[in-house]
Every structure is written in structure tokens, then in C-alpha cells.
Amino acid sequence: MKRKIILKFMLILLPLAAFTQEDKIDSILQESEFRTFEKGGNIFVAFTDGTEKQLTFTQKDEKPTLSKVKNQVIFLRNETLLKSGGEYTRKKIMKVGINTYIEETITDQKPFKDGLENTYDILHVENPTLSRDENFLYFITNHTATSNILIKLDLQNGKWNELFSAELFELLKSGPFENHFIIARKEVATKGGGLFYYLVDETGNKLKEFANEESVQQFKNSFE
């Protein structure tokens, strides 16, 4: 009788132990601070205990952005293609699960031809930045022959939202101007060239103008 009781206890304990071990992986990612980085064209995450985990293995990947909420990393993959006159490199915006290692392509083409290269291929992605809720990725890419545009990419369905022209941007994630942007924009026709700095909302409406980068930093320091 005593032996039967022990066996029943072990049968109950085994699945509980297995569940606890599996659950431990998720809890580590949710509770600890960790970061992502690129090394040798591959994407890694590093944990506070000093351990690292390699997520991609193509030697073609760059610019990782960490999504802690979804336990995944958004990154760019470079593809080299042949065309008349030589080679060129296009980019795909992808994601990889930190727990699962599974990769998915979010988008691999623009919904418009840019004025510089006349192609739907994604050739440039600058300053990829997650929205605060981590549902969207903001970045700069080619638009016309002389200017770039800020894109809001829906990470769920890959839809591109073209916001407004910008050469540089910073998304403000806290303070009185949370979810607003500091941008630098070319205004050749009206102001004689160069970059001009503004605080704008997501519609591109100008809320404030700055003399230069230094004055932008002074503005940010005033409410940080």
C-alpha cells in the first residue's frame, strides 16, 4: 500500500516539475533586464548574469530592436542580389522569438517606388525605433530623389503608414510630449538648405521650432 502511494505521488510530481522548468524560461525573460546586439552579422540577446543567447545564424543581420513585451527581437536582414552592372543589397524587416528561435518576415518591400532608386525594394532603414506599446516600428527610409520619410510599420500585418518627410527623428517616450517626435528636415526651397529641427505630432503638425541640435537637447533637459 505504501509503495502505491509513493508511485502516485511521483506521477503527480513529474508533470508539475516539467511545467515549472518550461515556465522558468519565460519568467527569466519577463523579469530580468536583458539587451540585444549584433555580432558578426548575427543577432544575440545578453542577460544580466553574463550569459548570451544567439538567435540568428545567417551572418547577414543587423540593427536589432528588443521587444520585451513580446519576447522577440525585430531586426534587418540583408540580401545581396545580382543586377545588370553588378550587385546590390536589399533589406527585409524580420522578427525572431527569443524563446522559440522562429523567424518571420514582417515586410520585404515598400508600398511605393522611391524617387532615388526607382524600386520597391527596401534599401535603407535608419534608426528603427519601437513604439511604446511595441506594436509599431518607426524608421526613416528613401522617399523622393532628395528627401526621406518617416514610416510607421504595423508589426502585426506589415502595413506601411507614411507619416511625413524627415531626415532624422527621435520618438519621445515619456514626459509632457510622450509619443511626439523631434525631427530634422530639409527645407531647401524656403530656407536655403540645411537641416531644420522641429517638435511635431504624428500628423507632422509643427509644435515647436529649434535653432540646432544643442537647443533640442536644452528643450529635452527642461522636462527630464
Image (spheres, rainbow, N blue to C red):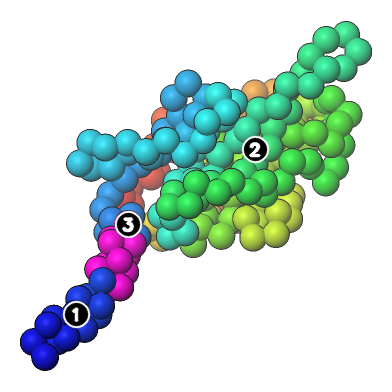
Q: Position of residue 124 (x, y in %)?
A: 68, 30
Q: Position of residue 129 (x, y in %)?
A: 52, 45
Is 18 within the magenta? yes
* Foreground disc of the pair 3, 2: 3
Outermost residue to the left = 2
Label 2: which secondary element: strand
Callout 3: helix, strand or loop?
A: helix
Over which residues does the magenta segment extend? 15-25
Disc 1 residue type? Leu
Choose the circle earlier in sequence order: 3 or 2: 3
Which mark is first along the chain, 1 or 3?
A: 1
Reply above or below: 13 against 85. below
Kindly identify which residue carries mark 2: 140
Q: Is residue 124 visible?
A: no
- Dot 1: element: helix
Q: Which residue is mark 1?
A: 7
Q: Residue at x 43, y 52 (%)?
A: 99
**To which quarter of the image does residue 201 belong?**
bottom right
